[in-house]
Amino acid sequence: MPAAVPIPESRKKELEEFQRRKCSGYCLKRFLCVWLRHDQGMSAIEIASSLGMNANTVRVVQRRFIAEGGGVFASHKRGPKNPRLMSFEEEGAFLEPFREAAENGSVLVAAEIKAAWEERLGRPVHAATLYRMLKRHGWRKVAPRPRHPKQDREALEAFKKGAMQKGSQERGQKGCH
């Protein structure tokens, strides 16, 4: 295994200054990754086992401290926090023409919105991503009713019975009832 990169004197001073600050949680673990190497001379594997971390993580923290300084301890991002393709405001602006069309009574199809979104982004987007965006903005699926709300069901049934009788009489058959 190659020898560890030595910590420069300027970084050692920065490390001693950072030691006086109070930090907790993951910030403290990251500080200890470098401090235990500097103060105790421990290897990355020993530090990893004592802190409950992976040895590669310890090495990465040490290398980043040498390259970037003490800001490495505080600026740790664990995973994507907002993996959106657009900001919430940009999404709202994109959906505005579709919202106006829907308010004017036109039927919107998700495939049309998806095609316009892909054109704007310049890359393909999965349909589930589109549906999550629509849900974020309070959109929901509204399907047309199967029948008119003022429809007279009795008149419809009478019409069906009359049509069946008339059709069967023309063919010389008896009715179905």
Image: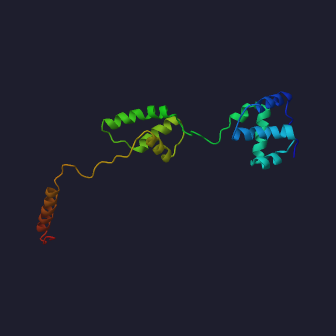
Residues 119 and 30: in front is 30
Give the x, y percent position of residue 56.
77, 46
Would residue 38 be seen by someone viewing this image from the given angle?
Answer: yes
Compared to 131, does 65 lie above or below? above
Which residue lies at the image location 28% right of the left edge and 50% below the top edge? Answer: 145
**What is the basis of the colouring in this image?**
rainbow
Compared to 137, does 50 lie above or below? below
Give the x, y percent position of residue 161.
14, 63
| Quarter-of-image position of residue 138 | top left
Compared to 145, does 66 lie above or below? above
Which quadrant would the C terminus be assigned to in this image?
bottom left
Would residue 4 be seen by someone viewing this image from the given angle?
Answer: no
Which residue lies at the image location 79% right of the left edge and 48% below the top edge? Answer: 50
Give the x, y percent position of residue 114.
46, 42
Give the x, y percent position of residue 21.
74, 31
Q: In the rendered view, does 118 fall on the left or right side of 167? A: right
Which residue lies at the image location 42% right of the left edge and 41% below the top edge? Answer: 112
Q: How many discs mark residues in the rendered view?
A: 0
Q: In the rendered view, does 43 fall on the left or right side of 82? A: right
Residues 42 and 93: in front is 42
Q: In the rendered view, does 21 fall on the left or right side of 99? A: right
Residues 16 and 142: in front is 16
Residues 122 and 43: in front is 43
| Quarter-of-image position of residue 135 | top left
